[in-house]
Image (cartoon, rainbow, N blue to C red):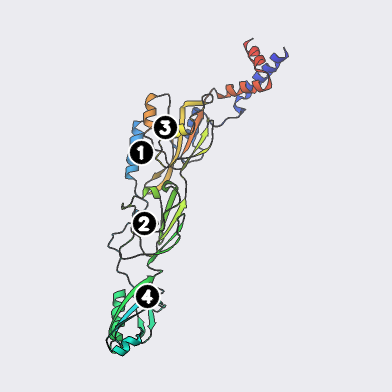
Amino acid sequence: MKVRNCLSLAAALWVAGCGTLPATGPTVGQLKSSVRKDSEGLKVELVPIDGVTVEALREADARRVSAFTPMQTDSGAYGPELARPSDVLTISIYEVGVSLFGSQSPASAQSGMPTAAAQTITGIKVDENGLIDLPYVGSMSVAGLSPRQIGKTIESRMRGLSQSPQVIVAITDSAESSVNLSGAVNRNGRYRLTVARQRLRDLIAEAGGAPADPEDIMVRLTRGATVADMRLSDIQVGSQDDVYLAPGDRVELLRRPRTFTVFGASDHVSQISLGPDRLNLLEAVAKAGGPSDQRANPRGVFLFRWEPVEGGEPKPVIYQLDMMQAGSYFLAGQFAMHDKDVLYFANSASNPPTKFIAILNQLFSPILTVKALTE
């Protein structure tokens, strides 16, 4: 009799305040009501996952403009290699006979036969005024000149001082004609651009690649005031996204693993990696362990996402999947998951009574509970 009285009291309390029992989230009805009220003013849109929705998302993905579009340039837009202040030059001077820069062996001097001598001078820095200084040649302006033009100018100044001089000039270091590469890459540093025009993937390959899956690497390209991000896996070699680099570019590789988060009536509320392959909604539900058989409503599988809007701010959209419809499984297999999606399994409306019975079983033995409820 005492057990029955205790159960009656507990039942009365449950009927009076069933909504106070702990829950992992709203039911389907509560979520839809919240969207209609939109108390936060976010203008959330609730969209059922059907054939029209899947096709619209596929077309939107196909139309999506590359983040690197503002940085795409023609391969011929990069001008010739020119010397600039702070550049470092290497100058090789070849002379015949008695030379100014090269040394002549005693045997050659005794034979009287003309010989060739060579001297390489390294580390010649162009000063802030665009000038360099060479012995016998003096001070000369090289800013804005190509290596070939610099060599011809030196040759002309050496005539009369040296026999048949020939000069080869190379720009060995240039801050203004370089790009900076940093972050999750094997060899950070400054890399010189050549007249051959390097692309973005060429630069990353030259630096030894990234020590992680391309899907988990975000490439951030900064050019002037423009900053854009793209996944390394989305930048195909030789494609328009594989942009030609320009002097002064900054490239940073960031570790940004692609994940989605699971909430609600699931046995495992967690953050899950999307993995190296493109994941669809059906695979994501399976990877999350699916909705709980005891607590979830199979008609209420929701996916929360910020959808990009061309020329505007992203908008919040909630997609609803009804797993009681056979066709939903085919549609979910064509619904692509995005980075930072939120997957929510709605609670069943019968969840509170189930939890109430569980509380009773914790307070009293299951046998007494069943007996009391059946009498």
Where residue 108 sits: x, y (%)?
31, 86
Quick one: 100 or 251, which is closer to the camera? 100
**Badge nearest the viewer, 2 or 4:** 4
Quick one: 146 or 227, which is closer to the camera? 146
Residue 56 visible within the image: yes
Q: Earlier in the sequence, mark 4 or mark 3?
A: 4
Quick one: 91 or 128, which is closer to the camera? 91
Quick one: 82 or 63, which is closer to the camera? 82
Q: Are marks 4 and 1 in contact (CB under 8 Å)?
A: no
Name the residue type under label 1: Leu
Residue 169 in which image quadrant: bottom left
Question: Residue 229, relative to residue 23: is it above or below?
Answer: below
Where residue 212 sits: x, y (%)?
45, 49
Would you name the residue on which mark 1 appears?
Answer: 57
Q: CA distance from mark 1 to mark 3?
A: 16 Å
Name the residue type under label 3: Leu
Which residue is the extreme one toward the top?
A: 375
Would you name the residue on which mark 2 appears?
Answer: 200
Q: CA distance from mark 1 to mark 2?
A: 29 Å
| Helix, strand or loop under label 4 | strand
Q: Earlier in the sequence, mark 1 or mark 2?
A: 1
Name the residue type under label 2: Leu
Q: CA distance from mark 4 to mark 3?
A: 61 Å
Would you name the residue on which mark 3 appears?
Answer: 282
Q: CA distance from mark 2 to mark 4?
A: 27 Å
Q: CA distance from mark 2 to mark 3?
A: 35 Å
| Helix, strand or loop under label 2 | helix
Question: Residue 197, relative to residue 356: is it above or below?
Answer: below
Label 3, residues with CA under 10 Å away: few <14, some 14-19, many ≥20: some
